[in-house]
Amino acid sequence: MRCSVLHLLRCVRLRLCSRRGRSRLPLWAQRIQAYIKLLAQSLCFNSLTDSDVVFDSIFEPVFVTVDYVTRWFGMVFVCLVVILTSSVVMITYIVLLPLALTTYSPAWIAWHSLYGNWNLIMIAFHYYKAIKTSPGYPPAEKNDRPFVSVCKKCIMPKPARTHHCGICNRCILKMDHHCPWLNNCVGHFNHRYFFSFCLFMTLGCVYCSISCRNMFLDAYNSLERFKHLDSEKPGIPVTGMGLLLGLLPSGQTNFQTPAPPYTFKEKMFHKSIVYMWVLTSTAGVALGALTVWHAVLISRGETSIERHINKKEAVRLAQWGKLYKNPFNYSKLNNWKIFLGVEKKSHWVTRVLLPSGHPPHGDGLTWDVFPVKRDLIAV
């Protein structure tokens, strides 16, 4: 009898506990609650979690949205570059060239023709190659190549200097950044084309800005004069004795002034010059700063992503009293020779000053580490 009573009490207790612990929330609310609890636990899953991990986790939806918009607006940026560059070229050939042929000396005409067309060819060639050339991807199949880590998104081995691009949604060899103006990643195989395009576009913008400076000032002053003439009244009122003397026909009270001394063609001529000078000057300053920054990175033997990684690594080692050295820095001159693919003295002309589609040094999968600075390519 006693055992049966204890068994009954135990059953009643278990039933009451199960009813008390049963959740009254609907199923969809329970799923949301479990997901929020999982997110909260993921922010402190181990002792290596820092502010960067928490920030990335919170703003992950924002990053995904930006990547999605950039991926779909890439062609818009490319078309914008083509349209703006083509407009400057059209103004140069249609507006400025006839003026230069009647104003400049034959020597200056030859100089502007040679330099301007050479610069235009270099811009078009390197921009086309930067868009069409693949930045380089690590092999998808299994191989014996050395790797430094495994990509947490691709779940594939990552060679040295390889990083994952969220916009392209794959890993890029020696990734520098994703350029929306190219609609392509800047990596191992098209980094030279990207930098050359920035360099020659900057030179072209500075060339147009300096050579058209006086024309810009004249055109701007002419537009201001035209604006002043347009604001004047088209006639002079005649009142009082003028009407009595019959200076005007009956019913007319204004003396009509002659037509303006400028035409629509002249006005558009001056506006196009102002447009070209403003566009090339602003683009030259912005693109020039970007070109200088990338030139500094190339001299140091690092990319834009590696710049941030190396800076954090230097700070970390400095706390231990150690000095960090970039293992891919082969000295400034050697870094430039490797980047430009210069293997002979003649290559400074044939591969740097002339359009060249030669591949970069190495395959982007393995990299030599030289703790002692010496020439990797003897020139």
Image: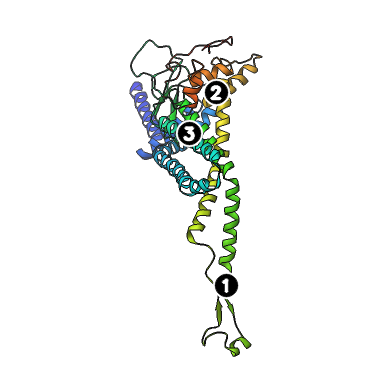
Q: For the N terminus, which image quadrant?
A: top left
Residue drawn at (49%, 56%) of the image: 268
Whether residue 240 appears in this view of the structure is: no
Q: What's the amino acid at mark 2?
A: Ile
Determine crowd level at label 3: few under 14, some 14-19, many 20+ residues with C-alpha closer than 10 A. Answer: some
- Using the rendered view, name the quadrant where residue 238 is placed: bottom right
- How far across and how far down the image is residue 202, in percent? 54, 36
Residue at the front extreme, as displayed: 106
Residue to which mark 3 is pinned: 118
- Taking depth in this image into account, of 287 and 7 the one nearest to the observer is 287
Mark toward the viewer: 1 or 2: 1
- Taking depth in this image into account, of 296 and 258 the one nearest to the observer is 258
Residue drawn at (44%, 20%) of the image: 360
- How far across and how far down the image is residue 174, in percent? 46, 22
- Taking depth in this image into account, of 144 and 24 the one nearest to the observer is 144
Residue to which mark 1 is pinned: 233
